[in-house]
Image (cartoon, rainbow, N blue to C red):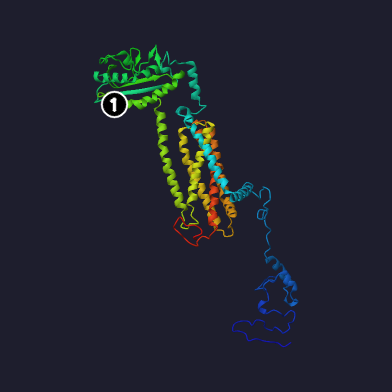
Amino acid sequence: GVATTATPRPGRTPRGQNRKVGGVAGETESREHEPRRGAAGGAWSAHPAPLASAEEAAEAPPHRRAPAWDAPAARSSRRQPVPASPMEEPRDPAERCSCRNTDCLERPLRRLFEGLASVLAARPWPFLLVPLLLSGVLGAGFIFLPQRQANDIERQFTPTWGPAKAERDFVRRHFPHNDSERFSAPRLPTEGAYAALIAVATNGTSVLEPAAWAEVLQLNATVHDAEYERLCARTAGRCASPNQLLSRHATPPVPGSLRFPLNDSVFLGTALGGVETDGGRVRRARALKLMYYLREDGPGAQDSRQWLQSFLQNITSKVAELRLVSIQVTYFTSLSRQQEFEGNTKSVIPLFSVTYFLTITFAVVSCLRLSCIRNNIWLASCGVLSSGLAVLSSFGLMLFCGVPFVVTVANAPFLILGVGVDDMFIMIAAWEQSLRKKEKSSVKSLLAETYTEAALSVTITTLTDVLAFFIGTWTAFPSVRSFCLYTGSNLDVLQQNYKRSELSQTPVRESQKPIGDKICLDSSCSTRNL
């Protein structure tokens, strides 16, 4: 009951003033913490004491309890927990697909690859040797490559069901032609099988002059060998004339004796070039065209093709032997375009070695490490090799199945190489991320972590690529169809298993020694030295 007073600080109201020892109910708090009524009444102002929880308020002495009017404010100021939404609640891994669980495809694939990692970590050699053996067996299909080559440009690069082919068949049925007895070039539904020579007079002279005309006759006699006489398209029992002027004029035509373009029911518009006329009569002509047609019907069609190939190989040397002075000769055949396409394809083949060399170099440099344990140069090289195995397997399988090998297919290995190297770098990046997790040190756990991260994305992207290529097989162009078949069937399962088997060999040395114990530059160092 003894009152105690404290010396107040200057300018401040003493805290706990008039507070009695033992305390009396109703006089427990200082005036500084007492709430004050405003002038309007009813509203409490000032700085109320901190609110206590409901449990603390119930256990406090009566003189420490908050007033009843403070209870609503305390309840309203307290932050109530917000119930979790259905999408934020943790999901059961065994839950079925729903609006809350959308990894219906990813989850089973992850489990599949984890199981594959366990099998591969235990027995990696079958996954390494089986793709190699199977690629070698399928690669034997290249023995059919000469038979599968499709050299018909018109057939490969025009729509299969195009109206032009139907209309040509209509013309062929109603306007048949006979190359052996009644050949007529205007009745041909196609351009035919032919060899064309164009003689151009030199020094601005005319090809109808005696000197130039004599050399034209020599050139014509050179082409008319015994083989051509057997295969030529015939009219009235003899070979069709390559030029109407040669059959009518054994000597040079007299200047002014020919009318152009129609001379005595003979059309000269396709026989003479660079024509100068005077009153419709030919004064001079710079060029003369010779057309040598061969038979396309019957069993002689293949022989005609061989003669044209021989013509392309030997015509240059034969013209050089004639030592022509008054004319210059150029040539063209119905096979020239096809041979140019084939020549472009053959010119691409030497680039394969350059491309693979540059790709292997880039992969090796990217995966090179100073640590002998972390060095992945062999893994990078095998990743590039797996793309080569995919090309060997897919091409061999398609050749076994009889798919035509067109000139556009020769560009497919470049595309397959690019896709394969991309997948290799994805797997190596996922592998190095798995190594950084110290709790995963066994080969099985490292491969499982790598597969769940990399193999899933690689498989899905590869499946979309394969799907896109097989959709391309529905096109009406046979060349595009063959390209999509050869590229889409690159047997990604084989090359991915080969990559994974090579990947499984690296943790054997990487997990035996922590990285960073020693850095070495000698490639022959081993984990024992480290």
Quarter of image, res 89: bottom right
- The residue at the far top in this view is 236
Kindly identify the residue that appears in the image at 50 percent across and 25 percent down: 163
Query: SS at mark 1?
Result: helix
Residue 209's place in the image compared with 518, above or below, is above
**Residue 192 image offset from top left, x and y in percent:** 42, 21
Question: How many residues crowd mark 1 within 10 Å: few (<14), some (14–19), many (20+)?
Answer: few
Residue 284 in view in this figure: no
- The residue at the far bottom in this view is 2
Front in this rendered view, residue 66 or 360: 360
Residue 198 in view in this figure: yes
**Residue 485 image offset from top left, x and y in percent:** 52, 35
Residue 501's place in the image compared with 249, above or below, is below
Q: Taking 67 as reference, is 248 left or right?
A: left
Q: Which residue is mark 1?
A: 320
**Residue 423 image offset from top left, x and y in percent:** 52, 47
Kindly identify the residue that appears in the image at 50 percent across and 19 percent down: 170
**Residue 357 image offset from top left, x and y in percent:** 43, 45
Q: Amino acid at mark 1?
A: Ala
